[in-house]
Amino acid sequence: MKIIVRVDNDIDDDIVILCKEKNSFVKSIEEYANSLNIIKIPFYKREQEYYVDLNEIIFFETDINNISAHTINEVYNIKYKLYELENILPNNFIRVSKSSIVNINNIYSIKRNITSSSIIEFNNTYKKIYVSRFYYKNLKERLGKKNEKI
Protein backbone atom coordinates (compact mmCIF):
# COMPACT_ATOMS: atom_id res chain seq x y z
CA MET A 1 0.00 0.00 0.00
CA LYS A 2 1.28 3.45 -0.77
CA ILE A 3 0.01 6.78 0.52
CA ILE A 4 -0.32 9.75 -1.81
CA VAL A 5 -1.07 13.23 -0.49
CA ARG A 6 -2.53 15.60 -3.05
CA VAL A 7 -3.41 19.21 -2.22
CA ASP A 8 -6.61 20.47 -3.83
CA ASN A 9 -7.59 24.09 -3.15
CA ASP A 10 -11.17 23.37 -4.22
CA ILE A 11 -11.79 21.10 -1.20
CA ASP A 12 -13.08 22.77 1.98
CA ASP A 13 -10.94 21.45 4.87
CA ASP A 14 -11.91 17.86 4.06
CA ILE A 15 -9.73 14.80 4.14
CA VAL A 16 -10.56 12.38 1.34
CA ILE A 17 -9.32 8.80 1.51
CA LEU A 18 -9.46 6.81 -1.72
CA CYS A 19 -9.01 3.09 -1.25
CA LYS A 20 -9.86 -0.26 -2.77
CA GLU A 21 -11.58 -1.44 0.42
CA LYS A 22 -12.25 -0.08 3.86
CA ASN A 23 -10.00 -2.44 5.80
CA SER A 24 -8.82 -2.15 9.42
CA PHE A 25 -5.90 0.10 8.44
CA VAL A 26 -8.17 2.59 6.64
CA LYS A 27 -10.63 2.49 9.56
CA SER A 28 -7.81 3.26 12.00
CA ILE A 29 -6.76 6.26 9.89
CA GLU A 30 -10.37 7.47 9.86
CA GLU A 31 -10.70 7.03 13.64
CA TYR A 32 -7.42 8.85 14.23
CA ALA A 33 -8.46 11.78 12.02
CA ASN A 34 -11.80 11.98 13.86
CA SER A 35 -10.05 11.90 17.23
CA LEU A 36 -8.03 15.02 16.39
CA ASN A 37 -11.15 17.16 16.84
CA ILE A 38 -10.24 19.30 13.87
CA ILE A 39 -13.92 20.14 13.57
CA LYS A 40 -14.63 23.65 14.79
CA ILE A 41 -18.25 24.30 15.69
CA PRO A 42 -19.32 27.79 16.76
CA PHE A 43 -21.13 27.82 20.10
CA TYR A 44 -23.20 30.80 21.23
CA LYS A 45 -24.02 32.25 24.61
CA ARG A 46 -25.83 35.56 24.71
CA GLU A 47 -24.18 37.73 22.04
CA GLN A 48 -20.80 35.98 22.08
CA GLU A 49 -19.42 33.20 19.89
CA TYR A 50 -17.20 30.49 21.43
CA TYR A 51 -15.09 27.66 20.06
CA VAL A 52 -15.14 24.97 22.73
CA ASP A 53 -13.03 21.82 22.53
CA LEU A 54 -15.42 19.02 21.55
CA ASN A 55 -13.96 16.82 24.30
CA GLU A 56 -15.55 19.20 26.81
CA ILE A 57 -19.04 18.67 25.39
CA ILE A 58 -20.89 15.98 27.33
CA PHE A 59 -24.08 16.06 25.26
CA PHE A 60 -26.23 17.92 22.76
CA GLU A 61 -29.98 18.16 23.20
CA THR A 62 -32.85 19.77 21.42
CA ASP A 63 -35.97 21.41 22.69
CA ILE A 64 -38.76 23.11 20.78
CA ASN A 65 -36.72 26.13 19.67
CA ASN A 66 -33.01 25.32 19.66
CA ILE A 67 -30.11 22.90 20.12
CA SER A 68 -28.04 23.13 23.30
CA ALA A 69 -24.51 21.89 23.87
CA HIS A 70 -23.73 21.00 27.49
CA THR A 71 -20.34 20.98 29.17
CA ILE A 72 -19.87 20.16 32.84
CA ASN A 73 -20.65 23.74 33.89
CA GLU A 74 -21.99 25.57 30.83
CA VAL A 75 -24.77 25.44 28.27
CA TYR A 76 -24.29 26.88 24.79
CA ASN A 77 -26.61 27.19 21.82
CA ILE A 78 -25.64 26.02 18.36
CA LYS A 79 -27.09 26.60 14.92
CA TYR A 80 -26.94 23.00 13.68
CA LYS A 81 -29.70 20.43 13.63
CA LEU A 82 -29.07 17.10 15.38
CA TYR A 83 -28.97 15.18 12.11
CA GLU A 84 -26.31 17.62 10.83
CA LEU A 85 -24.27 17.12 14.01
CA GLU A 86 -24.44 13.34 13.57
CA ASN A 87 -22.70 13.74 10.20
CA ILE A 88 -19.88 16.03 11.36
CA LEU A 89 -19.09 14.98 14.94
CA PRO A 90 -16.25 12.54 15.69
CA ASN A 91 -17.00 8.87 16.45
CA ASN A 92 -17.11 9.39 20.21
CA PHE A 93 -20.49 11.11 19.78
CA ILE A 94 -23.57 8.94 19.37
CA ARG A 95 -27.31 9.51 19.08
CA VAL A 96 -29.17 8.19 22.16
CA SER A 97 -32.67 9.54 21.52
CA LYS A 98 -34.59 11.60 19.01
CA SER A 99 -33.57 14.68 20.97
CA SER A 100 -29.98 14.04 22.09
CA ILE A 101 -26.43 13.05 21.17
CA VAL A 102 -23.86 12.15 23.86
CA ASN A 103 -20.08 12.08 24.09
CA ILE A 104 -19.39 8.49 25.17
CA ASN A 105 -16.01 9.53 26.60
CA ASN A 106 -17.80 11.41 29.39
CA ILE A 107 -20.31 8.72 30.41
CA TYR A 108 -19.99 7.68 34.04
CA SER A 109 -22.93 5.28 34.33
CA ILE A 110 -26.14 4.08 32.71
CA LYS A 111 -29.07 3.28 34.95
CA ARG A 112 -30.92 0.62 32.96
CA ASN A 113 -34.71 0.66 32.92
CA ILE A 114 -36.30 -2.19 30.98
CA THR A 115 -39.78 -0.63 30.70
CA SER A 116 -38.78 2.91 29.75
CA SER A 117 -35.78 5.10 28.92
CA SER A 118 -32.50 4.50 30.74
CA ILE A 119 -30.59 7.33 32.40
CA ILE A 120 -27.03 8.33 31.50
CA GLU A 121 -24.92 10.04 34.16
CA PHE A 122 -21.71 11.87 33.33
CA ASN A 123 -18.34 12.39 35.03
CA ASN A 124 -18.05 15.34 37.43
CA THR A 125 -21.53 16.80 36.93
CA TYR A 126 -25.09 16.45 38.13
CA LYS A 127 -26.39 16.55 34.54
CA LYS A 128 -28.24 13.49 33.25
CA ILE A 129 -29.89 12.53 29.99
CA TYR A 130 -32.17 9.75 28.82
CA VAL A 131 -31.29 7.06 26.32
CA SER A 132 -34.32 5.59 24.59
CA ARG A 133 -34.81 1.84 24.29
CA PHE A 134 -34.43 2.13 20.51
CA TYR A 135 -30.88 3.55 20.78
CA TYR A 136 -29.75 1.63 23.89
CA LYS A 137 -28.30 -1.42 22.09
CA ASN A 138 -26.23 0.74 19.72
CA LEU A 139 -24.88 2.74 22.67
CA LYS A 140 -23.88 -0.43 24.53
CA GLU A 141 -22.15 -1.78 21.43
CA ARG A 142 -20.22 1.47 20.97
CA LEU A 143 -19.21 1.51 24.63
CA GLY A 144 -18.04 -2.09 24.26
CA LYS A 145 -15.86 -1.16 21.28
CA LYS A 146 -14.42 1.74 23.27
CA ASN A 147 -13.44 -0.64 26.07
CA GLU A 148 -11.80 -3.05 23.61
CA LYS A 149 -9.36 -0.32 22.50
CA ILE A 150 -8.11 0.32 26.02
Image (cartoon, helix red, strand yellow):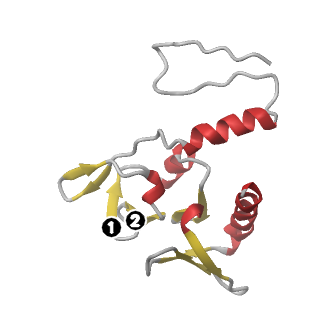
The residue shown at (76%, 23%) is 19
Q: Which residue is mark 1?
A: 74
How far apart are labels 1 and 2 at the CA level? 5 Å
Query: In this picture, is 81 found above or below 116?
Result: above
The residue shown at (34%, 70%) is 73
Q: Secondary structure at mark 2?
A: loop
The residue shown at (60%, 60%) is 95
- Rendered-image quadrant of the N terminus: top right
Q: Along the horizontal axis of the image, is 82 left or right of 148?
A: left
Q: Along the horizontal axis of the image, is 11 left or right of 18?
A: left
Query: In this picture, is 29 found above or below 44?
Result: above
Instruction: Estimate the x, y position of residue 136 in percent, counting from the top left.
Output: 70, 70
Residue type at the position of mark 2: Thr
Answer yes or no: do the residues labelled 1 and 2 have beta carbons within 8 Å?
A: yes
Q: Quadrant of residue 5?
A: top right
Q: Which mark is residue 45?
A: none
Q: Quadrant of residue 121?
A: bottom right
Q: Which residue is mark 2?
A: 71
**Foreground of the two, 48 or 132:** 48
The residue shown at (70%, 17%) is 3
Residue ranking furthest to the left: 47
Callout 1: 10 Å neighbours few (<14), some, many (20+)?
few
Query: In this picture, is 98 found above or below 28?
Result: below
Query: In this picture, is 125 found above or below 11?
Result: below
Q: Along the horizontal axis of the image, is 89 left or right of 115?
A: left
Instruction: Estimate the x, y position of residue 71 in percent, counting from the top left.
Output: 40, 65
Instruction: Estimate the x, y position of residue 110 in percent, counting from the top left.
Output: 63, 78
Residue type at the position of mark 1: Glu
**Foreground of the two, 67 or 51:** 51
